[in-house]
Image: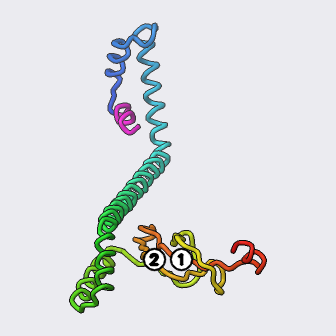
Amino acid sequence: MVISIRKGVSMTKGNHKQSCHKESCCNNPKEDCCKEHTCQCNNHQQTKNQSQPDLLAELTDTLQRLQAEFENYRKRSERECAEFKQYANRQFIEDLLPLLDNFALALKAVPDEGFKLIYTQFFDLLSRYGLKPISCDGKFNPKFHEALLQEQSEKESGTILEELQKGYIVGDAVLRPARVKIAWKPLNEKTSKASA
């Protein structure tokens, strides 16, 4: 838009004559055609002077939109980069979980202070990258727990009795659900005798 205004301002009557007849834009004789274009050029000059505030407002609006688009692009790029890093960390930690489980089993079998220290350092390192254990206290939550066994108990149905394998989360995502044994309480004694 700015380019067309500048061209219109810089054009002279002579240029109109040349461009008019080169393009053969009309069938009028040369003089009538040039008078017509001169009038249009003068009208354009008046329109330009009247619409300068409108043009300024339009350009300001365009600039603000471009700035907003760039800011949105920058934020989106940063978010995608952070998500990619978190995904890469999650994949790496998931590959290390069997090693962490084996360390925990070895520590139970041989309660050695050296093993305990190494296990603690290893777990602390993974915690810095967002690894957190899933708590198995209280009620069963299918979002975080996987019930492998049910056992009849006096406790309320759905109460976690034992953790069979630790579960972990990274950020907001469940890396591996905790595998648990949950309590099962019969509704009444008749149903428990019928099932036995």
Viewer-nearest residue: 147 or 170: 147
**Is 151 on the left-hand or right-hand side of 196?**
left
Task: Please state the horizontal and vertical placement of residue 170, each as a whole percent of the image.
Answer: 40, 71
Asked if the residues shown at circle 2 and circle 1 are in contact, with their CB atoms under 8 angstroms apart, the answer is yes
1 is higher (above) or lower (below) than 163 = above
Q: Quadrant of the N terminus?
A: top left
> Of helix, strand and loop, which one carries label 2?
strand
**Is 108 on the left-hand or right-hand side of 38?**
left
Q: Which residues are magenta?
A: 1-9
* Residue in the picture at 33% in, 85% down: 108
> Of helix, strand and loop, which one carries label 1?
strand
50 is higher (above) or lower (below) than 120 = above
**Looking at the picture, which amino acid does disc 2 mark?**
Leu
* Residue 25 picture quarter: top left
**Is 11 on the left-hand or right-hand side of 57?**
left
**Looking at the picture, which amino acid does disc 1 mark?**
Lys
Q: Main secondary structure of the magenta part?
A: helix
32 is higher (above) or lower (below) than 150 = above
Task: Please state the horizontal and vertical placement of residue 118, each as a whole percent of the image.
Answer: 23, 84
Q: CA distance from mark 2 to mark 1?
A: 7 Å
Q: How is the image coloured?
A: rainbow
* Residue in the picture at 59% in, 80% down: 139
Residue 3 magenta-drawn? yes
* Residue 194 picture quarter: bottom right
Residue 125 magenta-drawn? no
Q: Residue 181: which numbered mark, if any?
A: 1
Viewer-nearest residue: 76 or 144: 144
Circle nearer the N terminus (2, 1): 2
Q: Residues within 10 Å of mark 1 (few under 14, many from 20)?
A: many
